[in-house]
Image (tube, rainbow, N blue to C red):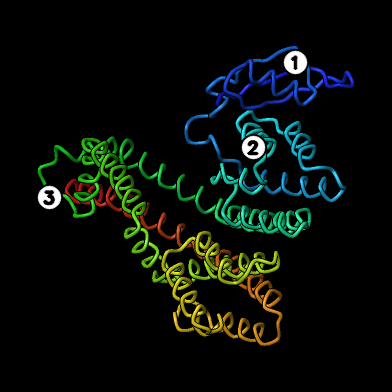
Amino acid sequence: MAVYEYKGFDSQGKGTTGMMEAESPRLARLKLRQDGIFTTDLTPVEETQKSGGIFFQDKIPLSETAVMTRQLATLLGSDVPLMEALAALIEQVEKPVHKQVWVSVRDRVREGASFADALGQHPKTFSSLYQQMVKAGEASGTLDLILVRMSQYLEAQVTLRKKIFSILAYPVLMMILSGLILLFLISFVVPKVTSIFSDMHQALPLPTIVLLGISDFLRNYGWVFILLVLFGIVGLKRYIATPGGRWHFDRVTIKLPFVGRLFKIMAVARFAKTLATLLEAGIPLLPALAIVQEVVGNKVVEEAIEKARENIREGEGIAEPLKKSGLFPPLLTHLIAVGEKSGELEPMLNKVSQSYENEVETTITTLTSLLGPFMILAMGGVVLFIVLAVLLPIFDLSQIVK
């Protein structure tokens, strides 16, 4: 269906604007008239605005989704009907691409679909976790409270991402600039300085030969190297997109030295936080674990959760199957066991998720603090090699002159 942007007046004569989906302009005007809106202008949204490019049609940033969820919870908590709350949200959205998503959700609700089913049209924005939480809220009549919990969950994810980004921004920027500087030196500066040695009939030192070889290769075949790197990246991404490739990639990442534990702890923290959020919403354990599998972000951990689900169906608790997998830290399985016995599983999961999120932040901070000096030493080593490669032939030439 096409998307139209409209301007008009409501039954009270107040000006209103918005967007809606319809199969034709006539049906769009008919829908608006049924809603008590008399249109003065109806224009189709351009394809470039509508889709924002094929890659961004259904995707809204997590930070904006968190804000809109919080606002929707506030409106519903103030006894505003869902349709009016969605209309209020749509008026606040500025980007046409993002507005289209909420318009589509509102139109599906108007046609009789549940709010959860309407959100299911846009899985790139509203995850399975989001949809199941909303479904539980609709079933229990506590949609506003569920949306508050969902907004808290999303806000925590946004905060963690911002912390990680702020920690990694400086070393990544430093790495890129250092690489560009070295590439410029080797490709343009070094050849001009070392050109005086090309006509020399005496043997050159090994560092100079290596430097000249690297410089010639980059100037003559640098484009081939770049193409190979690009093809390698594309090939790796396609391999990871396959189920088997993703499983092997995730298995390798959690076994890497230094950073492997970091990836594992990030998956475990996401597991604990998501499961706690679902259980607090009243979703039973087995369906909650099925949802967690989809959002944990690691195929190896996902496989361990599936095995745990099978054992739970046979009557076991959740702690022992997770412990047998060897992927979940003893602290997590112990607290889960305590929570199961005491009937306070959700608070235990929240505590352990907060603990592991703090560990992730601390680990990343430590690694980046070590990365800075390491990069400086590496940069200094490369510069020292270039200086020696240039100066050694000069020293040899001065000895010949003497």
Q: CA distance from mark 1 to mark 2?
A: 21 Å
Horizontally, is 304 left or right of 116 in the view?
A: left
Amino acid type shown at disc 3: Ala
Horizontally, is 137 left or right of 326 in the view?
A: right
- Residue 240 x/y as whole percent: 35, 54
Q: Earlier in the sequence, mark 1 or mark 3?
A: 1
Work out whether 232 lies above or below 374: above
- Residue 261 x/y as whole percent: 48, 72
- Residue 194 x/y as whole percent: 25, 40
Residue located 30% across and 53% down the image = 388
Give the foreground label among 2 and 3: 2
Work out whether 343 lies above or below 80: below
Q: Residue furthest right?
A: 12
Q: Earlier in the sequence, mark 1 or mark 2?
A: 1
For label 2, the residue is 108
Q: CA distance from mark 2 to mark 3?
A: 79 Å
Residue located 71% across and 13% down the image = 41
- Residue 314 x/y as whole percent: 49, 82
For label 3, the residue is 203
For label 1, the residue is 39
Q: Earlier in the sequence, mark 2 or mark 3?
A: 2
